[in-house]
Image: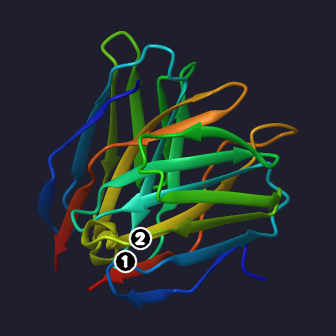
């Protein structure tokens, strides 16, 4: 089965700095890589995703990159703000007849004002 | 007009009891899931149903029994509760076909505390 490793588990940055979270996956059949943000006491919500036929995707201050050969993908947040403080989960999934999403362990990001 | 709703939000019970959590989605999605989030925040899939059919059943004790009466509902019944069952249980749904993206839409979670 799929195994997703995520690091770091905690990350503290100064407001305005960039934050990078890295993940690796094991199953070369995975074709969909979403990132979810979970604020304290709330539900996880999708912030950005990337499919295996794309190498990079950007949405305002967040971007994801995917290296299929190395089975690596990363989340980049620029110009961090206090409201970016949350737990971020990477995930890998194969979407075909069904979908099984495997999550990484999560990264607790703290943005210090 | 909550997309994925689950009840109850909080559940405190004694070891050995049986409890149920209900989930409903009004998004018209064809697939529903149960995830368990432990105290370390790890999100682990338990079950997945597609159009009322069980398609994913991870290594979960058979004290946990999901039921999907129709594609908009997925309930979770837990027998003989143990201390280790304490966690937040998230229901989620997604649409894979007819233009779906595969995005998981989560409910608010049900925090189960077993004493």
Q: Which is more toward the observer, A55 or A68?
A: A68
Q: Which is more toward the observer, A84 or B16?
A: B16
The numbered mark 2 sits on a residue in which chain?
B
The alpha-carbon separation of the residues under discs 2 and 1 comes to: 4 Å
In the figure, is residue A37 to the left or right of B68?
left
Residue bearing mark 1: B16
Helix or strand or loop: what does disc 1 sit on? Answer: loop
Quadrant occupied by the N terminus of chain B: bottom right
Q: Position of residue A6 (x, y in %)?
A: 24, 40
Few, some or many C-alpha atoms within 10 Å of disc 1 (few <14, some 14-19, many ≥20)?
some
Q: Answer yes or no: is residue A41 visible.
A: no
Quadrant occupied by the C terminus of chain B: bottom left
Please name the residue shown 69% across and 24% down the image.
Answer: A96
Q: Position of residue A88 (x, y in %)?
A: 33, 57
In the figure, is residue A112 to the left or right of B64?
left
Helix or strand or loop: what does disc 2 sit on? Answer: loop
For residue B25, which quarter of the picture?
Answer: bottom right
Residue bearing mark 2: B80
- The earlier-in-sequence mark between 2 and 1 is 1
Outermost top residue: A69
Q: Are marks 2 and 1 in contact (CB under 8 Å)?
A: yes
Are labels 2 and 1 assigned to the same chain? yes
In the figure, is residue A45 to the left or right of B22?
left
Q: Position of residue B37 (x, y in %)?
A: 36, 63
Q: Position of residue B58 (x, y in %)?
A: 47, 40
Please name the residue shown 82% across and 69% down the image.
Answer: B26
For residue B73, which quarter of the picture?
Answer: bottom right
Few, some or many C-alpha atoms within 10 Å of disc 2 (few <14, some 14-19, many ≥20)?
few
Q: Answer yes or no: is residue A66 visible.
A: yes
In the figure, is residue A99 to the left or right of A3?
right
- B41 over B115 or under it: above or below: above
Please name the residue shown 41% across and 70% down the image.
Answer: B80
């Amino acid at each position: 089965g799929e195994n997703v490793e995520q690091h770091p588990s905690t990350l503290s940055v100064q407001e305005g700095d960039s934050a990078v979270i890295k993940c690796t996956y094991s199953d070369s059949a995975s074709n969909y890589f979403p990132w979810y943000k979970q604020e304290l006491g709330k539900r996880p919500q999708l912030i950005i995703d990337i499919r295996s036929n794309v190498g990079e995707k950007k949405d305002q201050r967040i971007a994801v990159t995917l290296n299929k050969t190395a089975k690596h993908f990363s989340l980049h947040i620029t110009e961090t703000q206090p409201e970016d403080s949350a737990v971020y989960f990477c995930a890998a999934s194969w979407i075909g007849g069904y979908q099984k999403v495997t999550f990484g362990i999560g990264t607790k990001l703290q943005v210090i004002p | 007009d909550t997309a994925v709703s689950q009840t109850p939000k909080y559940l405190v019970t004694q070891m050995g009891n049986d409890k149920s959590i209900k989930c409903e989605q009004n998004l018209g999605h064809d697939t529903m899931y149960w995830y368990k989030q432990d105290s370390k925040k790890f999100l682990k899939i338990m079950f997945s149903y597609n159009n009322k059919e069980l398609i994913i059943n991870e290594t979960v004790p058979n004290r946990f029994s999901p039921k999907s009466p129709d594609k908009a509902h997925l309930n979770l019944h837990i027998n003989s509760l143990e201390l280790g069952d304490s966690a937040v249980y998230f229901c989620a749904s997604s649409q894979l076909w007819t233009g779906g993206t595969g995005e998981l839409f989560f409910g608010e979670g049900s925090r189960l505390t077993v004493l």
